[in-house]
Image (spheres, rainbow, N blue to C red):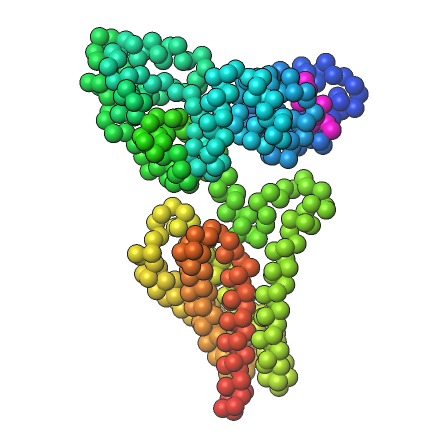
Amino acid sequence: MTAIEVKNDHIEEVKGLIEAGRENEVAALLEELHTSDIGRLVAALEEDEAVKVFKFLPPDKASAVLLEVDERRRKALISSISSEELIDVVHEMETDDAADVISELPVEEAKQVLDGIDRQEAIAVQKLLVFAEDTAGGKMQAELAAVHETATVEEAVEEVRKKAHEIENISNVFVIDKEGRLTGAVPLDKLILADPKTPIITITKRDPIKVSTDMDQEEVAKLFQKYDLISVPVVDHDGKLVGRITVDDIVDVLEEEIFEDFYKLAGLNTEARALDSPARSIRMRVPWLMLNLCTAAVSASVVKFFEGTIEQLVLLAVLMPIVAGMGGNAATQTITVVVRALALGELTFKNARWVLMKEVFVGFANGCLTGGLAALVAYLLGVNIMVGLLLFLAMIANMMIAGLIGSIIPLVLKRFNVDPAISSSIFVTASTDIGGFFTFLGLATIFMKMGLL
């Protein structure tokens, strides 16, 4: 049985148990499930059912489940429990997760939760709340193991033991000076193997890879990917150690960025979900569709401009969508490759010229191949050979336009600090539709004036 089948079985089973009022059996089932599975279950249930399931969870599991669901479902679950229960749940979270949840609460409720949790934890969370969510400061956790550079290995090991009950996944002990500035890091395996009386500074890796609190989360993710990091220290503008980011946080960032770009390329609001109500889905999607309508109107005006040409040879109306459609597909291929290269840092403004030239050449080559095939098929179907030539030339021209536009639009948006993914198929398809119609019908007009059609 696959994971998806298990998940669906659980959904139906829980629904049945809730309807039958067999609450003890619901609680027993939840005890057997991992918190990530409970999170997916809660996300898939109807809101009232999800609330009932959530109330069966102890604070430690409830805290993990809140982090598994999206913002809207999280708000519904939080609003279903009392302030006292919420304080118990938040108390079980690491500071970075607690900050994420508290930042979504109304001001008064957030203050009440901060007053209810441990004072030291509240201070740490408040420090995290000042940072933007998509920066290193917004992703870091305040919990870490750090020792002064005058400490011994034995003292460092003792610090790890002391912090182990409140910190998960300790991979490094950070070394700081008397001002709290980061001076180095010691991997846990190296620490364990060292002689207890050894000064920590002698086995410290000086000037470790670190990030500043205002670094964008995508840049942090690139560092983890490039250097295969498990965790990275976060410092403020004075170089003082203020937190750490672990690889599990970066996995969440990568997932978030991938789906954000995926949605933008499709012309969707990033908050849109499959289980949204029809009214919400309409509200999320209609702005981009309205923009698409405007671009389609521009494309239609090009066709209108050549109305006389189409009247003389109606066959043109049948063939021109082929040219525009192929251009749109080619442009989508180009823009996907270019946006990915920009995201990974492979494409910069220094090598952009070469990429532009390459994509235009690829468009030319693909235009020759696909245009030649289309012209041959049209000829075999009885179409005039000059119409086939027209189709061939228009296909080449529009595929070159696709390569050029698919490369330029993301680069231009990047230059103006706009997410390149917003260049989506709406803008690119509009360009290739206009280019395809204009090229095909323009060449047809020239052919007619020359007496070739």
Residue 227 rendering spot, x and y as whole percentages = 31, 34
In this rendering, does residue 78 appear at all? yes
Please identify the quadrant where the N terminus is shown.
top right
Q: Is residue 224 above or below residue 334?
A: above
Q: Is residue 276 above or below residue 9?
A: below
Q: How many marks?
A: 0
Towards the viewer: 404 or 92? 92
Q: Is residue 3 magenta?
A: no
Residue 403 rendering spot, x and y as whole percentages = 43, 63
Q: Which residues are magenta?
A: 48-56
Residue at point 54%, 50% (across, down): 264
Residue at point 64%, 51% (across, down): 285
Quick check: 309 left or right of 241? Answer: right
Towards the viewer: 289 or 376? 289
Q: Quadrant of residue 194?
A: top left
Q: Quadrant of residue 56?
A: top right
